[in-house]
Image (cartoon, grey):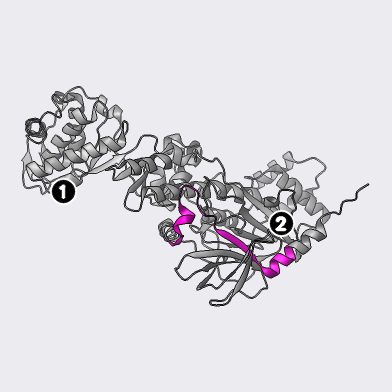
Amino acid sequence: MEAAMANGPKKQEKTAGGIDGPTNPMVTPLLTDLYQFTMAYAYWKAGKHTERAVFDLYFRKNPFGGEFTVFAGLEECIKLIANFRFTEDEIAFIKASLPLSCEDGFYDYLRGTDCSDVEIHAISEGFVVFPKIPLMRIEGPIAVVQLLETPLINLVNYASLVATNAARHRFVAGKSKLLLEFGLRRAQGPDGGIGASKYCYMGGFDATSNVAAGKLFGIPLRGTHSHAFVSSFMSPDEIIDKSLQSCDCSNACEDFVSLVQAWLSKLKWSHLLGGIFGETNQSELAAFISYALAFPNTFLALVDTYDVMRSGIPNFCAVALALNELGYKAVGIRLDSGDLAYLSCEARKFFQAIEKEFIVPDFGNMNITASNDLNEETIDALNKQGHEVDAFGIGTHLVTCYAQPALGVVFKLVEINNQPRIKLSEDVTKVSIPCKKRCYRLYGKEGYPLVDIMTGENEPPPKVGERILCRHPFNESKRAYVVPQCVEELLKCYWPGRSGKDREELPSIKLIRERCIKQLGQMRPDHMRRLNPTPYKVSVSAKLYDFIHFLWLNEAPVGELQ
């Protein structure tokens, strides 16, 4: 990604299917673990490399102590698969990395390897998903599918984790607040920063400060200025060009500085605001004036460099009122330190007092943005205290997924040559669910999803109004009948290979974001809450339950007591 950032994103060649290459040029067939190549060679050596295998990609536990996850990263997976081919340089490196005993025929095999015989069924990107349900079902020659394991996990793991983190922040902030992703400088490298911006937007954020992400994905950009900009000025005397044309271009103010100072004096002697402040910081005033002269239509100021209520807010209001006199409307302020609940409420009172005394319509509704190391917990605390913040700028805790570093996606073989396979463990949560499956979401009378159910591929699908027995995959006593009012099949074909099936189109990031917001809105509130959320039920059909336990008993060795 460093190279891409330095030279600009490379224009990717399109495949026959019209799918661009991966966004990150580092995503190549070599982005995998060495043991994938050693296994591929062993499969090839044994003559097993073309055997038809089915793998499930899924996760075992929802992140952040919650009970839901947002699936993301599918588009990048399909881009990898559509462009999966080895170059001669890559094959030479693989050859140098494997033992000398490996036969040349294997490298000839790699030269002809692609994903034309691979079939991908997946849940749509942006869907709310749950543990054990396959996010993707990958079917194809076992050696090829094994080579895809590590990059697919890599592309889904962080994407889903940060999209879920964004969705959780959106849930706690509420639908009406503007959420801004400010995490680039704290992200784990350029790729982490680009990915975070993309998937936070997908998870419900409104904009990013990341210019590269804005260009790559069309995400709206937001940003103002830093404390350095404010402290770089000494006094209004530094401002050379003091003129500003009115918004409608009908006249010009030749000395905007004097106009601002006149308004500051009016504020100081106002009967509603009198005594709140005395002399404000003149270097801050100079910075605000300069910024307003540069951006009169989008003036938003960082007001906590010196003192919010005694300097920042009065200085901002003087500039905003001067702009208003010329037909412009200031956007608002940003608070980056201090007691955000108290300061936002006091700032709102100040704005409302100005609207009332100077009869400036809508001045009391001036936008207040808060930043300063925010996370779910601090936003929840602000909500409980009461605040007047309209927008939250969130960085470190969001993009680094500070509360949980990884999702724990796994990739398990469930069938080979039409023979179901199971992975056993003393830890029942690590037992895989065998065979090629279909997955459905069953909805109740109120429109909420009730349960996700997995069935064998050839089982008849659940029907609306039909009583269905849903069983916990491993716990015999956990079972329930469901009469669904709506049935939604989850896995769709996103890469048909040679199957001849229709391929689902990859939607735009804007449409995925809309889908994600709609999905989150459909969930029952008790599944979504921060504290003690209700677990969502994931089940198997009665027939699949019986088969799982038959295969389990068949594969588990029988002990012998001496």
Front: mark 1 or 2: 1
Give the residue at x 39% y 35%.
373
Q: Residues within 10 Å of mark 2 (few under 14, many from 20)?
A: many
Which residue is nearer to you in this view: 304 or 300?
304
Horizontal side of residue 302 vs 280, given as left or right: right
Can see residue 528? yes
Side of 52 relative to 294 (left or right): right
For the point 19% across and 43% down, the residue is 330
Quadrant in the rendering for residue 222: top left
Q: Earlier in the sequence, mark 1 or mark 2?
A: 1
Rendered position, 279 above or below 119: above
Residue 142 part of the magenta-drawn span: no
**Where residue 546 is drawn, which disc sits there?**
none
Magenta part of the chain: 522-548
Q: Amino acid at mark 2?
A: Leu
Q: Which residue is mark 2?
A: 413
Q: Amino acid at mark 1?
A: Asp
Per the image, label 1 sits on a secondary structure element best described as: loop
Cβ–Cβ under 8 Å for marks 1 and 2: no
- The residue identified by callout 1 is 362
Residue 533's spot in the image, x, y percent? 50, 52
The extreme front residue here reads 477
User: Residue 90 at x, y = what percent?
Assistant: 66, 45
Near mark 1 (Cα within 10 A), the count class, few <14, some 14-19 or many ≥20, is few
536 in magenta? yes
Instruction: Return the x and y of residue 129 as percentages of the image width and height.
Output: 54, 57
